[in-house]
Image (tube, rainbow, N blue to C red):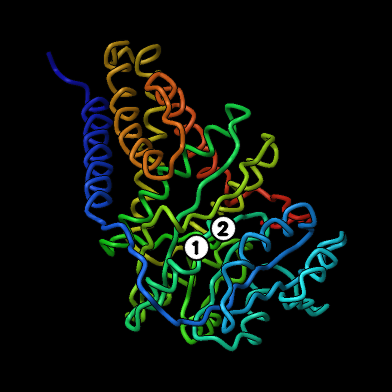
């Protein structure tokens, strides 16, 4: 029996996909958990906010008790038209800045706020996030003299729907990928909701941001600092997790993911770009593989099932590694099979439509 070239191609990519995720998980398991060490490092927490009156109060209240006398919090208000500024003003230890009229967007807000930072380190988070009680002390322990960036962990709260469950599991897997990629130096990934940067490196990176993309304040900065020989550390600690809410509707979910994906088209890190392209191509081949059954009759249903179970098994390993560390309820394997199918659809839709879709975020349309 002659094996169809189509099956050889997709089968080979499946083996490569499994191998890639297996190596990622093995690397993650070798990362030691961060232990707190005494440190007098001064930190300024910087939060760019736009129309966050419902969440910024809880965010600040989770951070303020962790501050030391040498620390600070700056909130930069990006032209909010709700009570965000009032919420911030009610907390006297927080410095509120208003973004200048001719500027807008998160990158501009962070750049403006950095001009007012007086500490050696800047820690970024988002206005809809909440910090673990030992978040800042853990960051201080990781902010060694030879480190320029400390990337941290994120997890989604919300288990009220299949959509929110998918987001929580997807983010858990992404955290394993980010941690392993950072430690090995093979990938340049970060999340601006839990990212600490040496102030001098932060300021030097601002001229190298991709202004055409609304997203990417985190990854573009990390890629530039890494390209200049800066050292990136990953904070693997159960005491330093940032929690945020998953999107509750399909509309806001797709808007968020198109925004996140927009930065991937401007990646300069070759390995990160290659991994993104490979994953998208693999998912696309899986989705069109049914045509080989019904049209070309090259694949059997058993071949088709085997191909999908290969991806589902690899995804399951990655996701369960993340959920166990982050303390998220572990999914059943059958649930992961369906999630793996949706993940492929999601990756292909984002990859093919991302460059052409105009999305709305915080009341602004952008691309």
State the image quarter where residue 338 is shown: top left
| Image position of 305 with respect to 71: above or below | above
Q: Which residue is identified by label 1?
A: 135
Question: In the current view of this chain or complex, which residue is farthest to the left?
Answer: 1
Q: Is residue 85 left or right of residue 315?
A: right
Q: Secondary structure at mark 2?
A: strand
Q: Residue at x 50, y 52 (%)?
A: 154
Out of 183 and 294, give the one closest to the viewer.
183
Q: Is residue 73 left or right of residue 131?
A: right
Q: Is residue 171 left or right of residue 312?
A: right
Give the quarter of the figure containing the C terminus: bottom right
Q: Residue at x 51, y 47 (%)?
A: 155
Q: Which residue is identified by label 2?
A: 131
**CB atoms at circles 2 and 1 under 8 Å apart?**
yes
State the image quarter where residue 213 is shown: bottom right
Residue 29 position, x and y percent, is 25, 49
Residue 210 position, x and y percent, is 56, 71
Residue 271 position, x and y percent, is 31, 59
| Image position of 230 with respect to 352: above or below | below
**Circle 2: is it few (<14), some (14-19), or many (20+) Cα within 10 Å?**
many
Q: Secondary structure at mark 1?
A: helix
Residue 177 position, x and y percent, is 36, 50
State the image quarter where residue 75 is shown: bottom right
Name the disc covering residue 304, or none: none
């Amino acid at each position: 029996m002659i094996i169809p070239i189509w099956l050889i191609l997709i089968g080979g990519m499946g083996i490569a996909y499994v191998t890639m995720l297996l190596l990622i998980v093995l690397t993650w398991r070798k990362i030691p958990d961060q232990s707190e060490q005494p440190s007098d490092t001064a930190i300024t927490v910087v939060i760019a906010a736009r129309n966050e009156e419902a969440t910024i109060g809880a965010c600040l209240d989770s951070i303020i008790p962790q501050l030391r006398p040498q620390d600070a919090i700056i909130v930069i208000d990006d032209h909010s038209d709700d009570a965000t500024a009032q919420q911030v003003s009610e907390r006297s230890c927080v410095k509120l800045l208003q973004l200048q009229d001719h500027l807008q967007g998160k990158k501009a807000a962070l750049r403006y706020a950095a001009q007012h930072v007086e500490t050696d380190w800047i820690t970024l988070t988002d206005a809809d996030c909440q910090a673990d009680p030992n978040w800042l002390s853990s960051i201080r322990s990781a902010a060694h003299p030879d480190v320029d960036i400390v990337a941290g962990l994120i997890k989604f709260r919300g288990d009220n729907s299949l959509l929110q469950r998918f987001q929580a599991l997807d983010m858990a897997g992404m955290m394993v990928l980010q941690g392993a990629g950072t430690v090995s130096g093979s990938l340049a990934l970060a999340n601006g909701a839990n990212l600490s940067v040496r102030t001098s490196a932060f300021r030097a990176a601002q001229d190298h941001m991709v202004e055409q993309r609304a997203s990417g304040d985190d990854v573009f900065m990390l890629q530039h600092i890494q390209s200049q020989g800066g050292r990136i550390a990953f904070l693997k600690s159960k005491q330093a997790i940032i929690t945020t809410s998953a999107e509750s509707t399909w509309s806001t979910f797709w808007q968020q993911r198109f925004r996140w994906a927009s930065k991937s088209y401007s990646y300069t890190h070759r390995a990160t770009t290659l991994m993104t392209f490979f994953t998208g191509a693999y998912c696309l081949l899986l989705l069109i593989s049914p045509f080989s059954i019904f049209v070309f009759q090259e694949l059997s249903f058993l071949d088709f099932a085997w191909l999908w179970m290969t991806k589902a098994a690899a995804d399951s390993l990655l996701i369960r590694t993340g959920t166990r560390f982050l303390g998220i309820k572990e999914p059943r394997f059958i649930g992961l099979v369906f999630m793996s199918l949706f993940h492929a659809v999601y990756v292909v839709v984002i990859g093919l439509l991302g460059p052409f879709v105009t999305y709305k975020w915080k009341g602004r349309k952008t691309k």
